[in-house]
Every structure is written in structure tokens, then in C-alpha cells.
Image: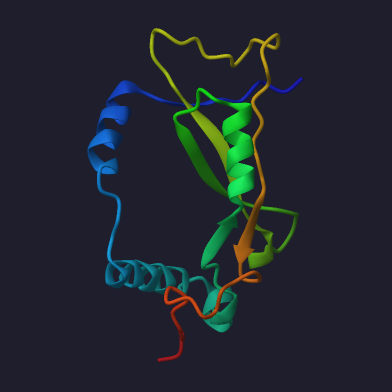
């Protein structure tokens, strides 16, 4: 059996998060600028320089899937999304996936379950859909982008 996987967060990280979670809203202008910076950075990859319409722009996560994750792991502090590529060989944007795992407090009061197979296994969830192909092209954050000079 594979080693049981569990993501943790320590007390200092929690304190840091608590400071920045108080106001996580940003303006649409700031969001657009962040999207532009992302598109500029990823456009340096040759595949996307030649085909900018295939650049990964977002990942859709169903709220029902998040609710199920919360139900399966009620003591989780949050979720962490890891980027991955499905398949083998030459990857495309359709292979992009967001791998979600619940994150737990790692402190002296809580024992990690990494090697205890008597407790419920922790699964890595892949219930995301990349954009493209599933995009809202009318979104203000779906900014036109060209790699031509």
C-alpha cells in the first residue's frame, strides 16, 4: 500500500495566513494586471508563443466537490491546489489538472496519520477542469493576448 499522504501547515504559517485572510479582495483592475503578468510569463514557453489561444488561464472547481472534501475531512483548515499534467508524452493544456488536498494543522496536539493505515486514508482529488477548453470567454479576466510583436 502507498504511504498515506497528508498536507500540513504549521503554527507560524497559520499566524501569517490569519493576518492576510482578513481582506483578500482585490480590485478588478488588480486582477486583470495579475492575469496579464501570468500570460506574459507563460507566453515564453514555445508552445504557447506559437499558439497563445491554448495558454492555460484558469481551473474550474465545482463547489459541490469542495463541499464533499469538507464533509470527508471536517477538521481540515483549508485546501491546497497542486498543478499537474495528466497523461504521458507531449503534454497539452487539456492535460492540466489541479490536484486538491486537505490541509491539516501540524502541531504537537495532532498526530500525523502518515503511516497509520487504521485511520481513514487521505486521498488526492482531481476534480478540476482547465481553461481552455472550458472557459468563459466573455469574462473580464479572459484578457485578449497575442505573442506577436
Closer-to-camera residue (8/25) = 25
> How far across and how far down the image is residue 136, in percent?
56, 74
Point 66% across, 31% down: residue: 123
Q: Is residue 46 left or right of residue 25?
A: right
Q: Quadrant of the N terminus?
A: top right
> How far across and how far down the image is residue 139, in percent?
48, 76
User: Does residue 54 lie above or below 121 as drawn?
Assistant: below
User: Does residue 32 lie above or below 6 as drawn?
Assistant: below
Outermost residue on the bottom side: it is: 149
Number of numbered markers:
0
Which of the 4 image quadrants contains residue 28? bottom left
> How far across and how far down the image is residue 76, in percent?
50, 27
Point 68% across, 17% down: residue: 120
Please say which color scheme the image uses.
rainbow
The answer, for residue 80, to whether it is visible in the render is yes
Point 55% across, 67% down: residue: 56
> How far across and how far down the image is residue 111, in percent?
50, 9
Point 61% across, 25% down: residue: 5
Which of the 4 image quadrants contains residue 72? top right
The answer, for residue 92, to whether it is visible in the render is no
Closer-to-camera residue (87/122) = 122
Closer-to-camera residue (111/48) = 111
Outermost residue on the left side: it is: 19
Q: Quadrant of the C terminus?
A: bottom left
Q: Is residue 41 left or right of residue 80?
A: left
Amino acid at each position: 500500500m502507498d504511504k498515506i499522504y497528508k498536507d500540513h501547515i504549521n503554527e507560524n504559517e497559520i499566524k501569517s495566513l490569519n493576518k492576510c485572510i482578513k481582506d483578500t479582495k482585490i480590485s478588478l483592475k488588480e486582477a486583470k494586471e495579475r492575469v496579464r503578468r501570468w500570460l506574459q510569463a507563460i507566453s515564453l514557453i514555445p508552445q504557447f508563443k506559437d499558439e497563445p489561444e491554448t495558454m492555460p488561464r484558469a481551473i474550474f472547481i465545482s463547489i459541490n466537490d469542495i463541499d464533499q472534501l469538507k464533509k470527508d475531512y471536517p477538521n481540515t483548515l483549508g485546501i491546497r491546489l497542486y498543478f499537474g499534467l495528466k497523461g504521458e508524452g507531449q503534454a497539452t493544456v487539456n492535460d492540466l489538472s489541479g490536484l486538491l488536498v486537505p490541509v491539516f494543522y501540524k502541531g504537537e496536539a495532532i498526530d500525523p496519520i502518515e503511516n497509520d493505515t487504521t485511520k481513514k486514508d487521505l486521498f488526492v482529488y482531481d476534480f478540476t477542469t482547465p481553461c481552455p477548453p472550458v472557459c468563459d470567454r466573455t469574462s473580464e479576466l479572459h484578457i485578449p493576448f497575442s505573442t506577436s510583436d
